[in-house]
Image (cartoon, rainbow, N blue to C red):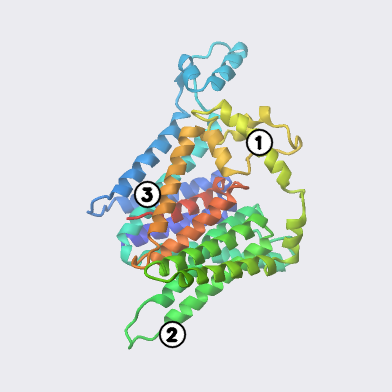
Amino acid sequence: MIPSISLFVLSVSWAYGVYAYGGVEVGSWRWCVVGVCAAALIQWLFPQRRGEGESRQLDVMILALVLFLGVLQLIPVPFSLLHLFSPHRFRQLAIASQAVGPIKTGSLSSVPAATRDSVLTLAVYVVGFLLVCDLRRRMSDRHWILAVPVVMIAFLEAVLGLFQFYGGGDGAVGTYVNRNHFAGLLEMGLPLALMLGIFALSQNRDRFQSRVLPTVVACVLFGSAAVMLVSVINSQSRMGFVSALVSLFICGVVGLSSHYSAGASQWRRWLPVVAVTVMIGLGFVFLPSDQLIGRFATIATTQEPSEDTRKELWKETIPLIEAYPITGCGLGAYESCFLPYKIVAPGYTTDFAHNDYLQLAAEFGLPGFVLVLTLAVLVYGSALRRTNVDNPGRYLAIACVGSLSAILLHSLVDFNLYIPANGMLAVWIGALARES
């Protein structure tokens, strides 16, 4: 009973973040923070008497270090010690002291107010990850329930996007401000809907039990996946479309290769993989709408930076990383600290690097970036290991591999993980992928 209540509160909180423009407004997102913390409190007031595995202990250690590094950026450090941790920040404050007088302490973050909000979001991610991990252990016999809220919200967003597009809008965006972040949500929900449908059909049932209900459920889920894919196409997000197809390709390849891995001839192992490759290739050719094809052919747009501009932004972010290699310039401080290095697109406000990896390295420093990347590798590897045929959670693991692949690919050219609702969803899926 307790896990169900906790899951409901978590789902409602995340759904509100999706509804509130993806949680980009600080005031709306704080209500989501309250909801996630309430869900964790409900869950952990009634702990399960069960030992923690090695993976859980390792995750807690990494997450604690990540959160510590985030909080460390806010703690006032004696001015004399700043030179050891962040020479560039030391020079900033030294110049400022000439105008405001002697400075005795200073934070490692160049914009403490922005870092405060970002650390709060980071803490919610940590709590959310541990909460979903705990829910998965407690609901191990019905782990797919944890994916149902994601599929439902993604489907409703997809339906809203279709109404917007066919109602005369320029593209499907759902409740999001940006089409790419709308596509980011759907590309993570798509593999879950697809594999949940396959899971419903794959269950062994007694010969006296009717297969009508599982078949109907599977059809509904396959239909939901199709609606999500069509909505991604109509969002006209180029990388969203590519990421969605890549997620389907990876789900097919991982699922089929693991199914035929033991004692199968080479042609039986590779023929299904080739078939999936051909199908996804045909989908890439025939599925895009005329508008999406036009966007692929467009070099630049008025609403977002062109590909060439993004490449220049990435190049100009490298010196920012080099200036703050150990502690970073501060979570959320990219926009302010990037100005001295920004040359391209002088009329364009650059509040994000359009590459989550580069921006995280710039804001969090290389040690923090390596910790986050290590956890991501552990989660992804854990999901891959659980895709073997004998694992009861195989289909969920395959779905997680597809969803994580999509968002990790999309993050190369966008800032989906800096949208709180999408970042929380990636954390949710990552927790589902982790071994118990």
Query: For the N terminus, which image quadrant?
Result: bottom left
What amino acid is found at the position of numbered circle 3 in the picture? Leu
Q: Position of residue 55 (x, y in %)?
A: 32, 49
Which residue is drawn at the image coordinates 47% and 40% (left, top)? 120
Work out which quarter of the rendered image holds the C terminus and state it: bottom left
Label 1, secondary structure: give it. Answer: helix
Q: Which SS class for mark 2?
A: helix
Other residues around mark 2 within 10 Å, as few (<14) / some (14–19) / many (≥20): few
Dot 3 crowding, Cα within 10 Å, few <14, some 14–19, many 20+: many
Q: Amino acid at mark 1?
A: Lys
197 sits left or right of 300 in the view: left
According to the image, label 2 marks what residue?
Answer: 212
Looking at marks 3 and 2 on the same chain, the residue that comes earlier in the sequence is marked by: 3
**Foreground tag (1 vs 2):** 1
Instruction: Find residue 315 and name its label.
Output: 1
Q: Which mark is residue 432?
A: none
Task: Classify residue 165 as left or right of residue 225.
Answer: right
Q: Which residue is mark 3?
A: 130
Q: Is residue 409 visible?
A: yes
Separation (CA) of disc 3 from disc 2: 37 Å
Q: In whole angstroms, how far apart are the C-alphas of marks 1 and 3?
A: 36 Å
Residue at position x 73%, y 39% from top? 348
The answer to whether mark 1 and mark 2 are in CB contact below 8 A is no
> Outermost residue, bottom direction?
208
